[in-house]
């Protein structure tokens, strides 16, 4: 096979999406809306059934925000672009993979060699991780040059900017292809170098954690903490609403990964955060976190 | 179910999300930034569950959900109010 030319970047048609949680469902939906086929893999049928329902409802509501009276895309047809499966071997012919499994190094460690064995050799792996080193993840494959970080923002279909991370061995060509893939999703990239947490979450996780300490220490209510960020700083959302949107379990796991990676006590998790996660208050996705979301 | 029951149920739901500000039944809660696209799915699912309707793709248009009045009108059009 000839070396692909930088100007001759392929158009992606079939993409593997690993993990059907908050991020995986968003990525799969976005791919389908852009006319790409997706193979969405998770560990259980229960999770996949819920994922399908979430994507379907989100596609229905997406129609509400169309600009004119043009008919909305048919959600049934769009969701039909996605294959929901627990079978990793369905990834044998995908051209690109976005990995979104739970933020635990021990779990991701098992996934990468598996993907490496099943996916075609030219397939690129994009790790959608909050904090884990891309260089480390690349090291679990025999193709570290084809592994890069793609830290998507949530909700994926609505956010047009992605923090792209260049691992130590990530090649220029992989970055070019990665950006072309994002362009197909209607997104742009800011490319940064690899250190755990990258730019966004090295700051954001500390901010959310410290905001939880404020609530625990009874300095202010969650609503007032958020109000200060919204009204005084002009942020769209305060840190605790943001935590609820991300998932408080994911915040906790990310802090733990940062703590383990840097060995720096500033990443210590707030006990109230731990308690809320233990109580099943995972934020928006579980129906309750610092606020209630149940219907 | 009467129209005013529906109106108060819709208002009560919105008031759970819109904490810091008053709004009228005719106010466009999306344009005012009181309801955002993240809440839209909860709003739609709430209305479907609470009133036992299933909105069509045609119904799912922002103009039908922009205000309490618009939502009550949409529910009326879906025939959920008992004939007076
Ligand atoms: N939530 C956010 O806002 C956000 C933003 C950017 C990146 N991320 C990152 O994206 C990743 C996923 O986060 P999330 O919020 O979707 O978490 P989530 O908990 O909602 O979903 C994780 C999913 O991974 C699945 N999973 C676990 N083991 C698996 C395996 N072996 N194979 C396939 N699937 C498996 C779980 O069943 C679950 O459905 C994490 O690395 C997280 O840090 C999250």
Image (tube, rainbow, N blue to C red):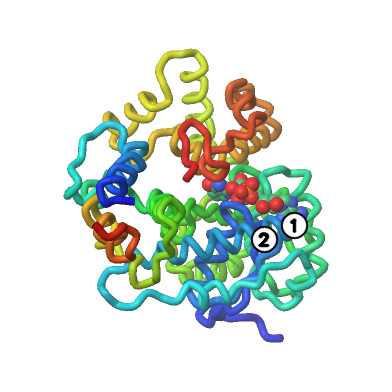
Residue A178 image offset from top left, x and y in percent: 56, 66
Q: Residues within 10 Å of mark 2 (few under 14, many from 20)?
A: many
Q: Which chain carries label 2?
A: A
Residue A169 image offset from top left, x and y in percent: 68, 57
> In the displayed structure, would residue B41 be above or below residue B12?
below
Q: Which mark is residue B61?
A: none
Q: Which mark is residue A48?
A: 2
Marks 1 and 2, how far apart at CA: 6 Å
Residue A7 image offset from top left, x and y in percent: 50, 80
- Residue A37 seen in render: yes
Q: Do labels 1 and 2 share a chain?
A: yes
Residue at x 21%, y 53% (from the top left corner): B69
The answer to whether marks 1 and 2 mark residues whose Cβ atoms lie closer than 8 Å is yes
Q: Is residue B38 or residue B25 the one in the foreground?
A: B25
User: Which residue is the site of mark 1?
Assistant: A44
Residue at x 55%, y 72% (from the top left corner): A79
Residue at x 39%, y 51% (from the top left corner): B43
Q: Is residue B57 or residue A179 the one in the foreground?
A: B57
Name of the residue lying farthest toward the bottom = A1
Q: Which chain carries label 1?
A: A
Q: Is residue B70 or residue A101 the one in the foreground?
A: B70
Ligand 1 closer than 8 Å to label 1 CB: yes
Residue A224 image offset from top left, x and y in percent: 36, 24
Q: Residues within 10 Å of mark 1 (few under 14, many from 20)?
A: few
Q: Quadrant of residue A148?
A: bottom right
């Amino acid at each position: 096979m000839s070396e692909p030319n930088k100007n001759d970047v392929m158009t992606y048609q079939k993409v593997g999406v690993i993990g059907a949680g908050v991020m995986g469902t968003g990525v799969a939906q976005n791919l389908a809306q852009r006319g790409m086929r997706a193979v969405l893999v998770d560990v259980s049928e229960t999770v996949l059934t819920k994922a399908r329902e979430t994507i379907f409802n989100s596609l229905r509501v997406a129609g509400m925000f169309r600009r004119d009276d043009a008919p909305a895309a048919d959600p049934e047809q769009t969701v039909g672009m996605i294959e929901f499966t627990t079978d990793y071997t369905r990834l044998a012919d995908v051209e690109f993979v976005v990995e979104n499994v739970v933020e635990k190094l021990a779990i991701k460690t098992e996934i990468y060699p598996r993907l490496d064995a099943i996916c075609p050799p030219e397939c690129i792996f994009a790790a959608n991780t909050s904090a884990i080193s891309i260089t480390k993840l690349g090291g679990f494959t025999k193709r570290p040059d084809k592994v890069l970080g793609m830290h998507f923002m949530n909700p994926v279909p609505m956010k047009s900017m992605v923090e792209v991370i260049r691992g130590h061995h990530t090649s220029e060509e992989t970055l070019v292809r990665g950006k072309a893939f994002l362009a197909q999703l209607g997104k742009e990239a800011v490319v940064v170098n690899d250190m755990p947490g990258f730019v966004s979450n090295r700051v954001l996780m500390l901010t959310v954690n410290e905001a939880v300490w404020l609530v625990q220490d009874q300095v202010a209510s969650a609503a007032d903490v958020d109000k200060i960020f919204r009204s005084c700083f002009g942020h769209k959302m305060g840190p605790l609403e943001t935590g609820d949107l991300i998932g408080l379990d994911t915040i906790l796991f990310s802090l733990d990964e940062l703590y383990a990676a840097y060995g720096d006590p500033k990443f210590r998790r707030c006990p109230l955060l731990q308690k809320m996660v233990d109580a099943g208050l995972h934020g928006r996705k579980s129906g309750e976190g610092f606020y209630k979301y149940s219907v | 179910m009467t129209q005013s029951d529906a109106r108060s149920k819709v208002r009560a739901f919105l008031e759970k999300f819109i904490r810091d500000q008053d709004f009228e039944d005719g106010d466009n809660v999306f344009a005012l930034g009181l309801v955002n696209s993240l809440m839209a799915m909860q709003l739609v699912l709430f209305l479907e569950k609470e009133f036992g309707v299933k909105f069509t793709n045609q119904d799912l248009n922002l103009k039908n959900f922009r205000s309490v009045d618009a939502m009550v009108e949409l529910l009326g059009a879906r025939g959920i109010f008992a004939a007076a």
